[in-house]
Image (cartoon, rainbow, N blue to C red):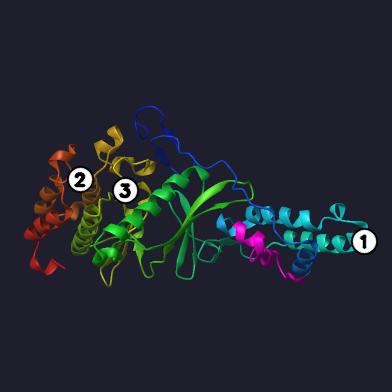
């Protein structure tokens, strides 16, 4: 079995995700009006510019482009064409040709400049795209201050990035505000077009300082695994009460802060009751309802969280906890617990008091 069953199943070539059905992205390029400025003003602005970025802000050209997000050479190329139409020597009178030639040469030189660090322009601000901060299932993550910029490697995964944005917005809107630290805050989401005119959805998330992925945790004591389990059930219960299923509770999607016993669930790209994709490399960790029927719910998250903890504890898991875990991982979701917060109470009933924190 290689992912979801049924028609329309494709294994994504590089990301290792198995998709439930082909995704769709916007193919049409947004219409941008010609700048409503004259030749003299265009020449003045071009000659005063220090970098091509100066021509992407302000005026009709910059304003229109910023409406559509955009970044890099794709966004710059679109602006370049607009400015070039205004000052190209072949489109002006003989008396203006020398001035136009100088302005056009300056415009071309500015456009050819390579910025030391690429800049991605969002709606709120511009983000510097330096070295890759982390590699996700679908995306590369870049850090700029307290912002983490999540850029899908393939345009076809933009629908999954959008799923994450919509899900985080729903959690913030409908979830109990007291539990918001269990998910990273979405700063903004937008679409940009690269130099090949491929459009991608980008999410900007709040950086989680001092946290480490469970995928990088070399070992955990049973006591440590217990507080992680309790935090997982707390965070999942919060999401479920807001009507959200995470859909991919895996080691790489859980960050912890060991000293403060903090936990954050990340990568909500697979959220929903009909998941669009799975992490193919982690296929054995998914319950049957996802693999067979493309369905997910609270019982799915409980199954996957239990499997995660079972792997984390390994052979050191005490027998009472092993029996408890077995009751959370039946093949049929109807036979599993459905309420993460109620399950947390049951877990606390079988562990020593000193571990209930």
Which segment did they paint magenta?
Answer: 48-65
Can residue 51 be found in the magenta stretch? yes
Q: Considering the numbered disc 1 on the image, is that residue within a helix, a strand or a loop? A: helix
Q: Does the magenta stretch include residue 89?
A: no
Mark 3 or mark 1, which has the lower sequence index? Answer: 1
**Residue under numbered circle 2:** 299
- Return the residue at label 1: 95
Outermost left residue: 349
Q: Residues within 10 Å of mark 2 (few under 14, many from 20)?
A: many
Q: In this view, does 144 lie to the left or right of 308?
A: right
What secondary structure is marked by label 2?
helix
- Percent position (x, y) of residue 112? 74, 59
Of marks 3 and 1, the one in the foreground = 1
Q: Distance between the residues labelled 3 and 1?
A: 66 Å
- Look at 50% across and 65% down and name the residue there: 124
Marks 1,2: beta carbons within 8 A: no
x then y, percent, for residue 343: 13, 54
Q: Residues within 10 Å of mark 3 (few under 14, many from 20)?
A: many
Task: Locate the C terminus and report the quarter of the image it occupies.
Answer: bottom left
Which residue in the protein does label 3 denote?
Answer: 248
Q: Tell which of 35 and 248 is nearer to you.
A: 35
């Amino acid at each position: 079995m290689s992912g979801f069953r049924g028609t329309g199943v494709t294994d994504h070539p590089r990301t290792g995700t198995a998709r439930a059905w082909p995704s769709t992205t916007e193919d049409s390029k947004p219409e941008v009006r010609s700048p409503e400025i004259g030749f003299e003003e265009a020449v003045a602005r071009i000659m005063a510019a220090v970098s091509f970025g100066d021509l992407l802000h302000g005026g009709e050209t910059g304003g229109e482009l910023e409406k559509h997000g955009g970044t890099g050479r794709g966004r710059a190329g679109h602006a370049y064409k607009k400015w070039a139409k205004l000052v190209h020597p072949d489109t002006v009178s003989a008396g203006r040709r020398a001035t136009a030639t100088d302005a056009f040469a300056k415009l071309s030189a500015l456009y050819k400049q390579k910025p030391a660090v690429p800049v991605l322009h969002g709606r709120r601000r511009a983000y510097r795209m330096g070295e890759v901060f982390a590699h996700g299932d679908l995306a590369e993550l870049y850090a700029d201050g307290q912002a983490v910029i999540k850029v899908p490697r393939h345009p076809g995964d933009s629908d999954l990035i959008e799923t994450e944005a919509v899900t985080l917005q729903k959690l913030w809107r409908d979830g109990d505000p007291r539990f918001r630290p269990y998910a990273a805050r979405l700063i903004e989401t937008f679409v940009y077009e690269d130099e090949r005119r491929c459009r991608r959805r980008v999410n900007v998330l709040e950086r989680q300082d001092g946290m480490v992925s469970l995928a990088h945790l070399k070992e955990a004591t049973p006591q440590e695994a217990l507080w992680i389990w309790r935090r997982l059930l707390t965070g999942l219960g919060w999401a479920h009460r807001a009507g959200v299923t995470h859909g991919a509770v895996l080691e790489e999607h859980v960050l912890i802060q060991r000293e403060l016993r903090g936990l954050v669930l990340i990568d909500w790209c697979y959220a929903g009751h009909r998941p669009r994709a799975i992490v193919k490399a982690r296929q054995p960790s998914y319950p049957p309802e996802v693999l067979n029927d493309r369905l997910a719910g609270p019982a799915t998250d409980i199954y996957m969280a239990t499997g995660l903890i079972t792997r984390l504890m390994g052979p050191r898991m005490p027998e009472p906890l092993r029996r408890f875990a077995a009751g959370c991982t039946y093949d049929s979701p109807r036979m599993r617990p459905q309420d993460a917060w109620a399950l947390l109470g049951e877990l606390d009933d079988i562990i020593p008091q000193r571990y209930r924190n």
